[in-house]
Amino acid sequence: MKRPPAENLYEQVARRLQEQVANGVYRPGDRVPSVRRLSTQFDVSISTVIEAYRRLESQGLLEARPQSGYYVRTRLWQPPAQPAISQPRCSPTAVSVSALAMKVLKASRDPHVLQLGVAAPHPSLLPMRALNRILARLARHDEGKGVAYDFPPGSPELRQQIARHALDAGCTLAPDDIVTTSGCQEALSLCLRAVTKPGDTVAIESPAFYGTLQTIEQLGLKAIEIPTCPRKGVSIEALKLSLDRWKIRACLLVPNFSNPTCAVMPEERKKRLVQLLAEREVPLIEDDIYGDLAHGSPRPKAAKSYDRKGLVMLCSSFSKTLAPGYRVGWVVPGRWREQIEHLKYVNTMATPTLPQLAIAEFLDHGGYDRYLRKTRALYAANIERFTHAIARYFPEDTKVTQPAGGFVLWVELPGKVDALELRRRALVQGVSIAPGPLFSATQKYRHCIRLSCAYPWGERLERALLTLGRLAQEMV
Amino acid sequence: MKRPPAENLYEQVARRLQEQVANGVYRPGDRVPSVRRLSTQFDVSISTVIEAYRRLESQGLLEARPQSGYYVRTRLWQPPAQPAISQPRCSPTAVSVSALAMKVLKASRDPHVLQLGVAAPHPSLLPMRALNRILARLARHDEGKGVAYDFPPGSPELRQQIARHALDAGCTLAPDDIVTTSGCQEALSLCLRAVTKPGDTVAIESPAFYGTLQTIEQLGLKAIEIPTCPRKGVSIEALKLSLDRWKIRACLLVPNFSNPTCAVMPEERKKRLVQLLAEREVPLIEDDIYGDLAHGSPRPKAAKSYDRKGLVMLCSSFSKTLAPGYRVGWVVPGRWREQIEHLKYVNTMATPTLPQLAIAEFLDHGGYDRYLRKTRALYAANIERFTHAIARYFPEDTKVTQPAGGFVLWVELPGKVDALELRRRALVQGVSIAPGPLFSATQKYRHCIRLSCAYPWGERLERALLTLGRLAQEMV
């Protein structure tokens, strides 16, 4: 039998050691076998054992003592508590986060700044070589298709692949159910335009992604923020009360790995959500951009999979998984198919042709699933490392989400810490963060920040988290 | 001295013969020298003379008589008359061209249809090999930049090139004056959103590009159509009267090679336009997408070049010159710089990265100007061939524009011909055309059609024009 690849091997070693600690084979304070010894015991290479020990160290299970070896930590590490369910003021309000958002965006163009404020994977974590190679080949052999307009609904090749892949999210789709877009942002914006007019009210999570908030602001809509649990997502009860009380034209939600909390609505809750909205004929605009980045398997279902009335408009893109710079997203508009196709045409006329074709080919040849398996594990490990560093460096009583997917952390600092001030000070130190008020129509979450963990782990990150912790400590 | 390339040589030969006819060396009905003879007289190859004679034939100067040779046509060909200045009803109206536009769009996806209805150059007329080669190289050597978001204002490399190139249009720009967009359509849409709100009135040409009309419709704006001369563009006097009478929030005009008439405002008129709007603080959204496709040299100036108050918002793209499928355009938003940058972010977050970089490199290495020189001549020749075929095959009294740039013809058929019916019948015969009512907010121009001439000339085109002419004749 062939050995599994090295990255799985050290995880196996780590898990076996974890089990031994759990079973009391090694107790807190015990020295675990030397690297050489374990290498012989488990019949793996020295470097695999070192990698396994480092991982267990970063998880807080082991600690290294200089000149002596690895020991089981005497006080086993507990991750910080998670933030509680949000308590927004449940009434329609105008949104104004644009000015702040543009400041954050400006800083994001500075290559000397460590961009923990932008939820974009570091290019080295994307399958850029394989994908760019396909793009290059398609460009070299293009006989005209690649330079021509690809009018809505967009590339048939890509829509076929998206339809196949949607089965993972529980959705049975035909290619013609799909319209490709210039990223998920355009998809969301088109959906809002299809089902609302200025002055209408849209229900959203709280906290919510600032890109969504800005679209709502720009379209002259009002937002109503629904209490949201950082684990289980939006409260159906609270949403129901709001639907009873206010004329809500649409819900725009992120049922899987919501940004910034990474909350996942349990399947039963998603089902109830879709039923509730179906009873009232309220469309659900579903942002599933992080859905494929579940750390475990299988990935959670899209709310769209429970849709029987064409009321759910499923939006997503490849910007978090393949290449933000390719600008390829899509929407499954349900009963608004014709309107969305037209709005897409009027908004940007077409989606870039060659990038669509390259992604279609990447999906077709199985590279996507392999890439996802690798990256999910990497993000899970990074989230763990970030959480560990936060527990070590940030002020006491800091709360952190425990995501089961995606790559962002939502950090609730002690009440005295002003996230906007923290952002300013951190930027001076070369670190960007996304301050909490960005994620609220009503400028809440002044003591919260969102950190992106989609970077190759290393000293620079550890130092940045140390710096952030120090700056936050100074403000307590 | 090196001989100029062959395509210039035959043009020289044709011109010299033209001069001889003009000077009376050969009169109508005279036989011109045989191909062999002229080849000796002018010291050029036989194939060059054949090419020159074919060109003069297609221009209607010569006619071939079988077994006999070429003769000067006895009735020298006069191009058909041009359409007169338009007479739209000058009052704000709601727009509704979307349903019709989407039908035309649907037909445009059929590869078996000859797409004379879509104003997109045939890929073989684009510099696709050179451009795709650059894209392929950039993709192969990408170290992360190409897959990453390129947030607004967009690629500095591309903005630098656009600024350099804008001097040809009389505009002195800095790279930071420019925001890149997903094509010109997005640029126009963002500009309208920046300076209007639903219910506002926008002044436009008549006829006007249907993409613009649809954006106005989608944004809930009203359009006021201004009388427009198919040679000199919008009437300043009529615009002034409308400005006096109605609250006009913005003008959206195409001063150079307007779509569909290819009208060019004389420089003095452009200057007066900019002054008139400046006095009243009304923004001018200038669509210059065809500006670089002037058949002569130098290209006409952009109205932006007369702007002293930052009131002109210049929009353009590379979709008519390089690659529609790359989706790269730009806007020079003047005093709305910040708003446009933000609107761009909210609308589609970023412009595709690698396509921007590829176009920047193509512009930087001089390929663009060379390509333009070649293509301008080709479009001029095609326009001539189309006009000739229309004069030959279409009903008497058909009027045609005489464009000095771009690649579309606006054809005014006798009043009895219904362009919508003609479109339906032509589509059955495998030819798409753009019917006149598409180009009006008030469904005018029912007897007009727009034809795109950006195809390699050949029998298929000739046959298509013959078919169109026959169908039109049947309706007279």
Image (spheres, coloured by chain):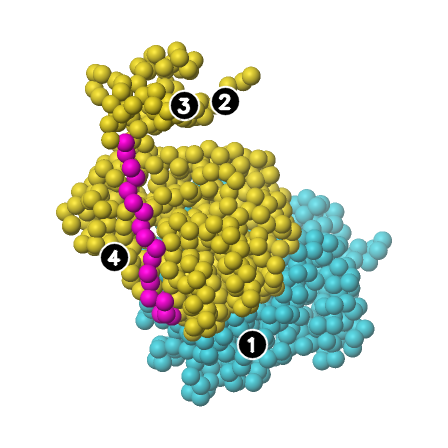
Chain colours: A yellow, B cyan
Placement of A3 over or under A443, stated as above or below: above
Q: Residues within 10 Å of mark 4 (few under 14, many from 20)?
A: many
Please give the name of the residue rendered at 32% of the width and 35% of the height, measured from the top-left corner. Answer: A385
| Range of residues picked out in magenta | A76-101
Please give the name of the residue rendered at 29% of the width and 60% of the height, measured from the top-left corner. Answer: A444
Please give the name of the residue rendered at 43% of the width and 62% of the height, measured from the top-left corner. Answer: A237
Residue corresponding to mark 2: A4
- Label 3 vs label 1: CA separation? 69 Å
Specify whether residue A84 is painted magenta: yes
| Chain name for mark 2 | A
Tell me how many marks there are.
4
| Nearest to the observer: residue B440 or residue A295 | A295
| Chain name for mark 4 | A
Whether discs 3 and 2 lie on one chain: the answer is yes
Identity, as a three-letter code, of the amino acid under mark 3: Arg
Identity, as a three-letter code, of the amino acid under mark 2: Pro
Q: Secondary structure at mark 2?
A: loop
Specify whether residue A315 is painted magenta: no
| Nearest to the observer: residue A146 or residue B196 | B196
Q: Secondary structure at mark 1?
A: loop
Residue corresponding to mark 4: A446
Residue corresponding to mark 1: B95
Which mark lies nearer to you, 2 or 1?
A: 2
Q: Secondary structure at mark 4?
A: loop
Residue B346 in view, yes or no: no
